[in-house]
Image (cartoon, rainbow, N blue to C red):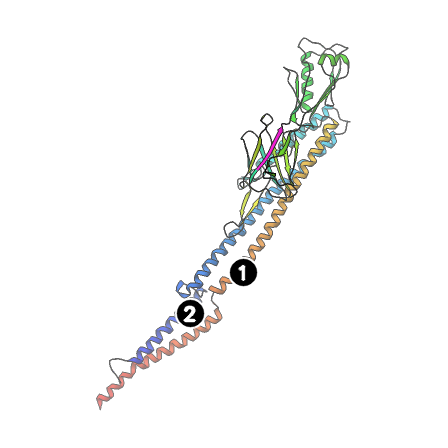
Amino acid sequence: MRLNHNALAYTANNNLNTINNNLTKSMERLSSGYKINKSSDDPAAKAISQRMKAQIRGLDRATDNANDGISVIQTAEGALDEVHSILQRMRELAVQAANDTFDETDRDAIQAEIDQLEDELDRVSDTTEFNGRKLLNGELNKKGYVDPVNSDKVSIFEIGGDIDPGEYGIKITSNGTQAEDVMSILGAGVTITKEQAGAVTINGLSVAITEGMTGDEVNERIRDAASKVGVDLDLTSGKLSTQEYGSKQYICIDASNDELKALLGVDGTEERGTDAQVDFVDNGGKRVGFKDTATIDAQGNRITITDKNGFKMVYDAAPDSGAIDPVNITVLSAGPLVLQVGNNEGQTFNVNITKTTAESLELSHINIYTHEYANKAIEKIDAAISKISGVRSSLGAYQNRLDYTITNLETANENLTGAVSRIQDTDMAEEITEYTQQNVLSQSALQMLTKSNARPEGLLQLFQR
């Protein structure tokens, strides 16, 4: 038995310290709910759980992003529903105007409403926004530019297809032209005689020329009538030209009697415009950019390239470009609304929304002043309705994809959360059992430390003897 060193007490104290440390850790786990509260508890598991937590927070944010994308699409869809309503009303008016029971005054009223509806199309396109971003004015469409740079415009549509960024080449061998004609401008001193009185017909729209009208009055009346059917009359030169380009544009001006024909210099001959002549640029037997299945259609100077996979590129050549050179169209990846729908780089989703102005829908020059023009208006409006239907179909497909994306993100979030829980969360039943065991051991160790410290007192009995 030794006095200076009480080895049993040291042993009991060490065991008590170890038990108290374990008891402290157990209390910490029970109070926090985590079995890893600091890196020293399990360095590897701590690193893994933190990385998983970052992924979970990214998935949460990506889910919110996808829901925001759905809100954008629903906003655009709501506006396009109104666009469809506008187009349906325009078509109804065009069908009404195609009936020859209406006179020019009636058609004036119908045309006035159609013009207002065209303006409303532009207003809806320009003012439909989500969080300050315009949705229908072409800002969210894939962008392209033309080389050489001029006033040409490129519109790119992706309905069920895709246009890869890169260089695309077309070759214009001749530009589209307007229909043109000429008539005699009457002097201010001219007065219509009884023999000259009759009617002037321009593109099917009849204008009454009565006895006693002055030359200026005749000129003004013909100019106003021509404007209604999309023809401009220069009162200085007498030149007539259509407002649009292409082979579908025509001028036919005639008079009801020979005297009036001679006075105005018209004979009823029909003059038509021409369409641009276009081909693909060939580089060593292969088209530049475009696939072999792509086709070209030209109406005036509007050149439309389509392919079987659903893409469409519209190129509006400048009417006075003159130069017959290859046109290089560069399509950029910029433009579409990019949604970050994943928690990692590159996990994005592009939303393209095409421009829906009256001009982009080819409705900016429609008129209904004759049966023929009203029927053409119906044809154009039907095409616009079909285009908007395609855009809405595309938006619906986007929304369905985003719904699936959100479901997938939520499933991944659930599984990752479960994995982090298994790594980091405390098993309360198991930990309470451990705490109880360590608490009992702590009390026992404390008793043994008390006993071991009491043993040296036995040495005093040896001195007493």
Answer with the quarter of the image where residue 14 lies.
bottom left
Amino acid type indicated by mark 1 = Asn
C-alpha separation, residue under disc 2 versus residue under disc 1 = 27 Å
Image position, residue 316 (x, y; %): 60, 31
From the image, state whether disc 2 or disc 1 is nearer to you: 1
Q: Is residue 80 above or below residue 21?
A: above
The residues colored magenta run: 168-175
The quadrant in which the N terminus is found is bottom left
Query: In the rendered image, which quarter is residue 146 located in?
Result: top right
Q: Which residue lies furthest to the front in this view?
A: 284
Q: Residue 26 carries which label?
A: 2
> In the rendered view, does 84 fall on the left or right side of 442?
right
165 lies left or right of 188: left
Crowding near pointer 2: few (<14 within 10 Å), some, many (20+)?
many
Q: Is mark 1 on a helix, strand or loop?
A: helix
Position of residue 23 measured from the top left corner of the image (x, y, whole percent):
40, 71
